[in-house]
Image (tube, helix red, strand yellow):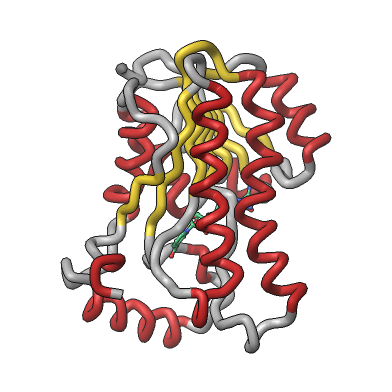
Amino acid sequence: MSLENKTVLVIGGSSGIGRGVADLTAAAGARLILVGRDAEKLVRVQKEFADSRTFAVDATDEKALARVMQSIGPVDHVVSTVGGAMGGGFMANSVEAVSAAVDGKYLVALRIAKVVVPYIREAGSLTITAGAGGRPHNASGAVIGNCATRLLVQGLAVELAPSIRVNAVSPTWMDTPLWRDVPREQVDETKSYFDRTIPLKRTATVGEVASAYIYAMTNTFVTGQALVVDGGLGLVQ
Ligand SMILES: NC(=O)c1ccc[n+]([C@@H]2O[C@H](COP(=O)([O-])OP(=O)(O)OC[C@H]3O[C@@H](n4cnc5c(N)ncnc54)[C@H](OP(=O)(O)O)[C@@H]3O)[C@@H](O)[C@H]2O)c1
């Protein structure tokens, strides 16, 4: 299925992976709608995508997102890259921090799905974002959130078939603005660790990860999958 003249909503399209999805989607001839929280960032990004529309909203606020969806109307595909990051094991973090990481990934994705699905046209898709890499002892809440998100797409895929396909993309660590609050030196050290550890001996480009979302949107026989884009990290870690 081509994305030409399709309406694609990218929640998280103003930065990082979502921004990469916006680039590829626009290049494929789709009508682009970008959602993020920061209105100024959206204005800057919108200038690069002629005819795109933007909406500044916190997608974790179901009522606010529902109002935005009412003004957007029907769409063909929805991508969400909303989700956070967490390091450390169960003993190193508070129960609240572990719970917040799980909720921030899986329950947020569920809430977004409940709001946006009624607006997705027949034969459309929803693609959300999980994550790969990390183990329970060093990424506790994030690992649970990612596992739960993978199970969420399996459930939604069956519940929404045959009308709407539902998939997730699972990237592993990569250098994006997600790490904006982490000191640059520490980000560089982490990158160097993954450059050594990932079998392909480097971290992904945003384009490589974004292309998995395009695959999820356009392959009309793929549903309920979490597409792992990790350079083989899961095979050795
Ligand atoms: N980068 C990595 O190493 C990595 C690895 C594994 C998984 N992931 C997952 O990939 C996803 C995207 O990460 P990224 O690296 O692209 O991060 P990013 O560069 O920080 O981009 C996140 C995007 O989502 C938007 N966003 C975040 N929370 C939102 C909310 N509540 N409502 C509306 N928009 C929201 C942000 O907009 P505003 O800035 O305006 O809020 C921004 O456009 C996350 O789910 C992350 O867990 C990333």
Residue at point 45% right, 32% down?
A: 49
**Quarter location, residue 172:** bottom left
**Residue for point 58% across, 59% down:** 145
Decide if residue 230 is in sight here.
yes
Which residue shows up at 35% across the image and 46% down it?
227
Query: In this orientation, which residue lies closer to the viewer: 104 or 22?
Result: 104
- Residue closer to the observer: 48 or 196: 196
Q: Which quadrant is the N terminus positioned in?
A: top left
Horizontally, residue 137 falls left or right of residue 71, namely: left
Q: Quadrant of residue 152?
A: top right
Percent across and percent down for residue 151 are 52, 46
Residue 46 visible? The answer is: no
Between 6 and 233, the residue placed more toward the observer is 233
The single residue placed furthest to the right in the displayed view is 63
Expressed as whole percent of the image width and height from the top left, the position of residue 164 reads 50, 20
Q: Is residue 46 left or right of residue 1?
A: right
